Amino acid sequence: MKIAVIGTGYVGLVSGICYAELGHAVVCVDKDPYKIATLQSGGIPIYEPGLEELSRKGVAAGKLRYTHDLAEAVRGTDLVIIAVGTPPLPSGQADLSYIDAAAAEIADALTGYAIVAVKSTVPVGTNERVRDLIRARTDVPFDSVSLPEFLREGSAVRDTLEPDRVVIGADSPAAAERIAELHRPLTKQVMLTDIRSAEMLKYASNAFLATKISFINEIANICEKVGADVAEVAAGMGLDRRIGTAFLNAGIGYGGSCFPKDTRALIQIAGHVEYEFKLLRSVVEVNQDQRMRIVRKLEAIFGGELRGKTVAVWGLSFKPNTDDVRESPALEIIRHLVDSGVVVRAYDPIATPSFRGLFGDGGVVWCDGALEAARGADALCLLTEWEEFARTDLHGLQETMRQPILIDGRNVFKEEDLAGTAFVYYSIGRPSLN
Ligand code: NAD
């Protein structure tokens, strides 16, 4: 198949590269000249394990290329995939201006029949809006398909090549079948449905996962008060197959470019049809409070006064194995610490440049290593569960710190890891140590 992918972000780039890996002829398009120049020179503008190798392989095989010329990419193609951003407006509603602009450009570039698929996460009715926009500008025949994306940053290549399921929303059975054929080598679970259900299903999935996270975080908060251990509670809950173990890790809550945006967007979608999604409102509120629990713990430890303290922060990305810091809990936590007069010493294995880009530089000492960040600190807050943190020599760590106080916002360490150290250890929903 000849495929044009519009938008080379986390979704478009990974999808395009993986379709090329399947042997299709793929052109990835972006407006951002830096991204296209990086890609054309063999690099990758985002951090995603395994992606750069696959990109080079696709290009070398003549299956993959990159351009900023959308019209040239769309001309004569069989499938156009829209994978542009749908960031939140201040109201929480999804901003569809990138979708609209891409649709208009595609309409002007179509030369013959093509399928136009929307991979971006979009409110119910958006595929119809895209179809109407294109129809208003061209007589060239096309079909619309909703193709929601479920990949996770950090494991995006594997998620794309071995997805749990592929959902295809279409009203043309022939178009649905062509898109199904494209994905059948990847999974047996190809679900065909109507366009609106496909659009809704994506939001419902993310809202449900966010609900699981806020649920276990509230259980963790209660565990702290009643002297139970949330890790034990979650492990026991997960043995019930109706519940499952996934997304039951208590911590400082979800972040990233999807869950915060998609939960708020679904509340708005419900509101537009005069339905108040009370449960999801609470999920968002619990998540907001949860990230501040780290700060509350620090305040409690230091008797309410943080000014003049030095606090090390490990982890800036919203989760491990990505450089994406959009809506990362670290943004808000570090902002609060800096505003409270704390000297923050921060380290992340990958995400420091993107974090600095969003946060600015004021008040933070950016460090090149985990131990360097901890040097002379009165406390250490672990905010992202990067694997290297779990392997820390805690005796060595203790030596570098002014006070051995560890607040583990992701429940990375176990009691036995701390044995023989002097660490005062706080985590989320588990008993404190020392
Ligand atoms: P992103 O912001 O990383 O990338 C979007 C890209 O589209 C940018 O590079 C931008 O320059 C480009 N773009 C915008 N308008 C364009 C145009 N007219 N022509 C060419 N390029 C254009 O976004 P992302 O994280 O890849 O997400 C894309 C969509 O997929 C969103 O709707 C998101 O909700 C959804 N999604 C994201 C994830 C994820 O993990 N990031 C997972 C599933 C779904």
Image (cartoon, rainbow, N blue to C red):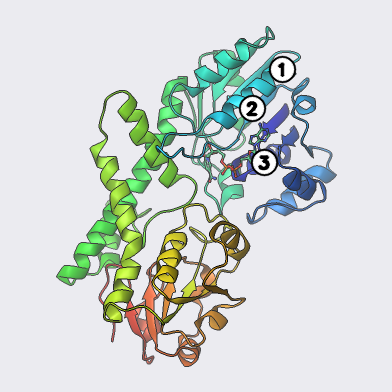
Q: Secondary structure at mark 3?
A: loop
Pointer 1 residue Cβ closer than 8 Å to ligand 1:
no
Q: Is residue 177 left or right of residue 293?
A: right
Crowdedness near tag 3: few (<14), some (14–19) or many (≥20) residues, C-alpha within 10 Å: many
Query: Which residue bears the numbered disc 3?
Result: 8
Would you place residue 326 above or below residue 185 in this image?
below
Would you place residue 372 above or below residue 350 in this image?
below
User: Which kind of residue does numbered mark 1 sit on?
Assistant: Asp
Query: Which residue bears the numbered disc 1?
Result: 108
Mark 3–mark 2 Cα distance, whole angstroms, equals 13 Å
Position of the C terminus by quadrant: bottom left
Horizontal and vertical percent position of residue 221:
23, 63
Would you place residue 244 above or below residue 407 in this image?
above
Horizontal and vertical percent position of residue 164:
49, 41
User: Which kind of residue does numbered mark 3 sit on?
Assistant: Thr
Q: Secondary structure at mark 1?
A: helix
Q: Earlier in the sequence, mark 3 or mark 2?
A: 3
Observer-nearest of 404 and 395: 404
Whether residue 118 is visible, yes or no, is no
Q: Earlier in the sequence, mark 3 or mark 1?
A: 3
Observer-nearest of 151 and 71: 71
Q: Quadrant of residue 308?
A: bottom left
Observer-nearest of 362 and 413: 362
User: Which kind of residue does numbered mark 2 sit on?
Assistant: Ala
Q: Which mark is residue 102?
A: 2
Pointer 3 residue Cβ closer than 8 Å to ligand 1:
yes
Pointer 2 residue Cβ closer than 8 Å to ligand 1:
yes
Q: Earlier in the sequence, mark 2 or mark 1?
A: 2
Q: Which mark is residue 48?
A: none
Mark 2–mark 1 Cα distance, whole angstroms, equals 10 Å
Residue at point 55%, 51% (across, down): 153
Position of the N terminus by quadrant: top right
